[in-house]
Image: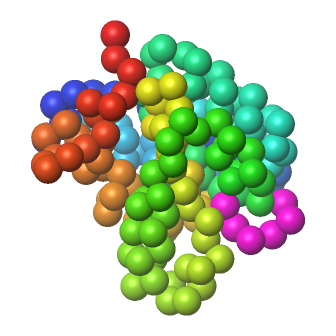
Amino acid sequence: MGVETPLNISVITVSDTRTPETDKSGDVLVNSLQEAGHALHSRAIIKDDVYLLRAAVSQKIADPDVHVVLMTGGTGFTHRDNTPKAITPLFDEEISGFGELFRQLSYEEIGTSTIQSRVFAGLANGTIIFCLPGSPGACRTGWDKIIAEQLDSRHKPCNFVDKLKRE
């Protein structure tokens, strides 16, 4: 059964090494959003560079046809993980509960290693941006246990659909 209010979703994989053929995390997100009844607006693989990431996401935020951006990768704890530094300055509002809940759920799967996950989400210009780790398992956890319900207008007591830009 699909969602009541289909959204246009862009998927961005943050990676210096992945290709369309090896982007399993992006595949998980694309398949999940389409199975739920949402539309894939666009998909890209962007190098883990602060300014390239900021430019790509800024274009999505400015596009009236993009409601959601799902990002995978660049949220770890190495010098090449630039997603938080690149994206958080774009937010009008941070959704701090997303990272908190994700790490709680992730703890059940990977134990204390979850403390090195800097997942986060926020709203910018009526667009919601979810930033997930670069593993397919983490993308499944994020989508199945949090994001899917929050992008379904039927989920109560609240969801994000009424907070997104709509024509």
x and y, in percent, of residue 35 in the image: 29, 42
Look at the image and say whether residue 92 sits in the magenta stretch: no
When asked about the image quadrant of residue 159, the answer is: top left
Is 113 positioned to the left or the right of 48 in the image?
A: left
Q: Residue furthest bottom?
A: 112
x and y, in percent, of residue 63 in the image: 55, 16
Is 127 positioned to the left or the right of 89 in the image?
A: left
Q: In the image, is residue 15 above or below residue 57?
A: below
Look at the image and say whether residue 76 sits in the magenta stretch: yes
Where does the N terminus fall, quadrant-wise?
top left
Residue in the image at 22% along x and 28% along y: 5
Is 89 positioned to the left or the right of 101 in the image?
A: right
Q: Main secondary structure of the magenta part?
A: loop
Residue in the image at 36% along x and 51% along y: 147
Q: Closer to the camera, 3 or 50?
A: 50
Task: Give the magenta part as a residue range.
Answer: 75-80
Where does the C terminus fall, quadrant-wise?
top left
Residue 27 visible in the snapshot: no
Q: Residue furthest front?
A: 92
Q: Closer to the camera, 39 or 53?
A: 53
Is 156 positioned to the left or the right of 141 in the image?
A: left
x and y, in percent, of residue 60 in the image: 59, 25
Q: In the image, is residue 114 above or below residue 117?
A: below
Residue in the image at 58% along x and 39% along y: 91
